[in-house]
Image (spheres, grey):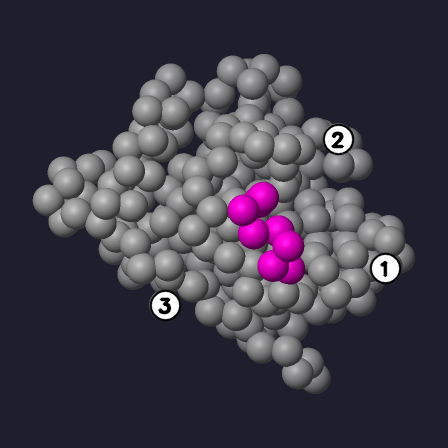
């Protein structure tokens, strides 16, 4: 039905890093800096000593299922590039599973399930992740930081085509819960938004394009789109 193909999550040639910790905010900056330095150095000796060390084949898979007007629209499955952006990947994974529970700061349930897409721009991207009112004005991470935001980890992954997943921000170092999935190449977003992964198969891309058809050129939605289910799934 659709001629566009799923984009493979690209590897910029850096060594694998990952953090499967609980995402506490206390040492976040130090852990991110360490991971970035090790990725750039590409040293096996350094990376082997790091808690971030993982292989590409260990990256988590997460999923989202969508509904609109009582109609099931399908599932999108995503590989999170925890080997490249471990902190951002862990934040997104926890928001998919809902394991963090409610925010101690705002009382908002830190979970994508039950939230909605608030912006869908044809030939660009779909946007969701406002866990409060769903209008795009709220974005809180699952990492327990004092501000509810976390810094830009790196910009190693690029916006190479449809199916790229990344974090919405309001400027440098303001990542929270809002995310986007591209429906076309958006190279102008490189170095501005952190890419965290990509959809893994054509079925997911077909669902993405179905969601895109419910959007407009200016970003409005023809009907409300909700995330009916989300979580982590086994790698196959």
| Magenta span | 186-193
- Assign the N terminus to one quadrant of the image: bottom right
Above or below, 106 against 40 in this view is above
Local SS, label 2: loop
Q: Nearer the viewer, mark 3 or mark 1?
A: 1
Q: Nearer the viewer, residue 34 or 165?
A: 34
Camera-nearest residue between 216 and 210: 216
**Nearest-to-viewer mark from 3 and 2:** 2
- Residue 104: x and y in percent read 55, 16
Tags 2 and 1 touching, CB below 8 Å:
no
Looking at the magenta stretch, what is its main secondary structure? Answer: loop
Which residue bears the numbered disc 1?
Answer: 217
Q: Nearer the viewer, mark 2 or mark 1?
A: 1
Most extreme residue toward the left, as rendered? Answer: 45
Q: Which residue is mark 3?
A: 236
The C terminus: image quadrant: bottom left
Q: Earlier in the sequence, mark 2 or mark 1?
A: 2
To which residue does mark 2 refer? Answer: 137
Left or right side of 42 for 13: right
- The residues bearing labels 3 and 2 have C-alpha atoms spaced at a distance of 36 Å
Q: Is residue 233 magenta?
A: no
Instruction: Locate residue 39 relative to residue 106 in the image: left or right.
Output: left
> In the visual, does 16 lie left or right of 142?
left
Query: Considering only vertical position in the picture, is 8 above or below 47?
Result: below
Residue under the image location 56 percent in, 23 percent down? 148
- Picture coordinates of residue 24 (x, y %)? 39, 23
Along the polypeptide, which appears first: circle 3 or circle 2? 2
């Amino acid at each position: 039905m659709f001629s566009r193909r799923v984009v493979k999550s690209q590897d910029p040639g850096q060594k694998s890093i990952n953090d499967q910790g609980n995402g506490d905010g206390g040492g976040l900056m130090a852990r991110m800096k360490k991971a970035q330095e090790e990725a750039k150095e590409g040293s096996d000796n350094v990376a082997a000593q790091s808690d971030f060390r993982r292989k590409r084949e260990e990256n988590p898979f997460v999923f989202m299922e969508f509904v609109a007007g009582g109609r099931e629209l399908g599932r999108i499955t995503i590989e999170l590039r925890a080997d490249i952006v471990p902190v951002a990947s862990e934040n997104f994974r926890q928001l998919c599973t809902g394991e963090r529970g409610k925010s101690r700061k705002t009382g908002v349930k830190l979970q994508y399930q039950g939230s909605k897409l608030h912006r869908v721009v044809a030939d660009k991207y779909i946007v969701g992740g406002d866990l409060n009112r769903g209008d795009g004005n709220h974005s809180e991470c699952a990492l327990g930081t004092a501000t509810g935001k976390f810094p830009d980890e790196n910009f190693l992954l690029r916006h190479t085509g449809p199916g790229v997943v990344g974090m919405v921000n309001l400027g440098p170092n303001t990542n929270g819960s809002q995310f986007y999935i591209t429906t076309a190449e958006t190279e102008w977003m490189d170095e501005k938004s952190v890419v965290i992964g990509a959809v893994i198969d054509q079925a997911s891309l077909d669902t993405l394009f179905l969601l895109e058809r419910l959007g407009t050129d200016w970003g409005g939605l023809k009907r409300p789109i909700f995330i009916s289910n989300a979580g982590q799934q086994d790698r196959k």
